Image: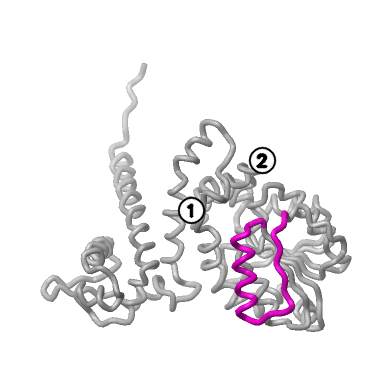
């Protein structure tokens, strides 16, 4: 047997990359804690401060804050002056780490690392035995999904996303019927209900926690033109009822996406619109090699989207099912006219405007 000769340069380069991955994986957990404890928000409003001053301003335990700051300093996120023992978060970094950053707040997303990590052993078991991990294993999912999508809907839904379908906004202003499939905590449907008081809105999801959150928010807002129900989207059985049906990053999670899309088609009026937001990617792996979030989305699929679908005997499309397969399934469901749009403020999603 021939002796394999290693390329020492490649070997060392990959070992260095692995060290960086290890470091960054742990750093992501610390960034998540910084977001949840509002340490980034606190520091963004402070002058350079000691750990005691930062802890006091954030109303947190100083010893934990000091150790967290050490991770942030060695991770080149927070600056440190050893002469004064003061820490500072630069404004250039704060714009990617604080709630004031809105859609640009990247610290939020690190929370998903610990969430999916909590089911790691269950997913490992699925590698051996098949099946999947049910949504009940992710108690924070609805909370995180609502926190993720809320700023997007607040900033873009009414003025940018809905106008992607020509004539849709005028139709809703006159009064129409709208359904959000897989509505989660219901924020999108509540935003639309508030903006178009003459239209009627409904939100369906099989999560009782999500539906309860949607109802609570509607009550706080005093909305009387919206209703929520715990329901399987594959069993709508409401033929020709809606002018608009939306699905925001929900179809690829469905156990039976083909049945859901057919039910959506049947529930639309003949001139109705189906507006579907889903991940902007190709259905072909080789065409995703340069996708900036390729590893993240394929990991999210393995650890959440695909496995939850398989847990219910589903198809397991996965997060990166891609535009080609999405178009195929929409056509199969009876949508003859599909336009795929993108918006600059949401570069990682496609918006499918589908009509029969």
Could you tell whether 241 is left or right of 225 in the image?
A: right
Decide if residue 24 is in sight here: yes
Which residue is found at the position 72% from the left and 74% from the top?
226
Q: Which residue is mark 2?
A: 313
Q: Position of residue 192 (x, y in %)?
A: 69, 76
Disc sitting over residue 31 in the figure:
none
Q: Which numbered disc, 2 or 1, marks the residue that appears first in the sequence? A: 1
Q: Secondary structure at mark 2?
A: loop
Q: Is residue 231 magenta?
A: yes
**Which quarter of the image is occupied by the N terminus?**
top left
**Position above or below: 181 against 44:** above
- Against 257, is 230 above or below? below
Q: Is 108 situated above or below 5?
A: below
Residue 217 colored magenta?
yes
Q: Quadrant of residue 30?
A: bottom left
Percent position of residue 282, x then y = 62, 52
Q: Residue at x 77, y 63 (%)?
A: 354
Mark 1, Cα crowd under 10 Å, few <14 / some 14-19 / many 20+, is few
Of tags 2 and 1, the one toward the viewer is: 2
> CA–CA distance between discs 2 and 1?
24 Å
Label 1 sits on residue: 296
Segment colored magenta:
206-232
Q: Nearer the viewer, residue 356 or 110?
A: 110
**Residue situated in front as seen by the camera: 161 or 58:** 58
For residue 217, which quarter of the picture? bottom right
Percent x, y for residue 275? 72, 66
- In this rendering, position of residue 85 left or right of residue 94: left
């Amino acid at each position: 047997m021939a002796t394999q000769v290693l390329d020492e340069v490649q070997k060392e380069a990959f070992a260095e990359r692995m060290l960086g991955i290890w470091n960054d994986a742990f750093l992501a957990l610390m960034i998540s804690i910084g977001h949840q404890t509002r340490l980034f928000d606190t520091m963004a409003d402070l002058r350079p401060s000691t750990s005691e001053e930062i802890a006091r301003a954030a109303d947190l335990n100083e010893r934990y804050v000091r150790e967290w700051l050490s991770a942030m300093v060695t991770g080149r996120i927070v600056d440190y002056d050893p002469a004064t023992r003061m820490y500072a978060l630069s404004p250039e970094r704060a714009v990617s780490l604080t709630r004031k950053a809105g859609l640009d707040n990247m610290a939020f997303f690190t929370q998903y690392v610990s969430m999916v990590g909590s089911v790691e052993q269950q997913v490992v078991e699925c590698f051996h035995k098949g099946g999947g991990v049910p949504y009940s294993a992710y108690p924070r999912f609805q909370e995180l999904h609502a926190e993720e999508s809320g700023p997007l809907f607040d900033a873009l839904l009414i003025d940018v996303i809905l106008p992607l379908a020509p004539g849709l906004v005028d139709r809703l202003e006159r009064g129409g019927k709208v359904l959000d499939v897989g509505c989660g905590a219901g924020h999108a449907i509540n935003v639309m209900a508030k903006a178009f008081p003459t239209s009627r809105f409904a939100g369906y999801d099989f999560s009782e926690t999500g539906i309860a959150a949607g109802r609570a928010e509607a009550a706080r807002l005093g909305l009387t033109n919206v209703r929520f129900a715990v329901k399987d989207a594959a069993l709508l059985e409401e033929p020709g009822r809606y002018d608009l049906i939306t699905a925001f990053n929900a179809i690829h999670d469905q156990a039976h996406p083909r049945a859901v899309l057919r039910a959506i088609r049947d529930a639309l009026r003949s001139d109705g619109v189906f507006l579907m937001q889903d991940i902007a990617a190709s259905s072909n792996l080789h065409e995703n090699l340069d996708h900036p979030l390729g590893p993240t989305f394929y990991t999210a699929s393995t650890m959440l989207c695909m496995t939850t679908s398989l847990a219910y005997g589903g198809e397991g499309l996965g997060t990166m099912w891609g535009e080609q397969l999405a178009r195929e399934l929409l056509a199969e469901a009876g949508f003859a006219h599909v336009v795929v749009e993108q918006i600059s403020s949401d570069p990682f999603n496609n918006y499918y405007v589908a009509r029969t």
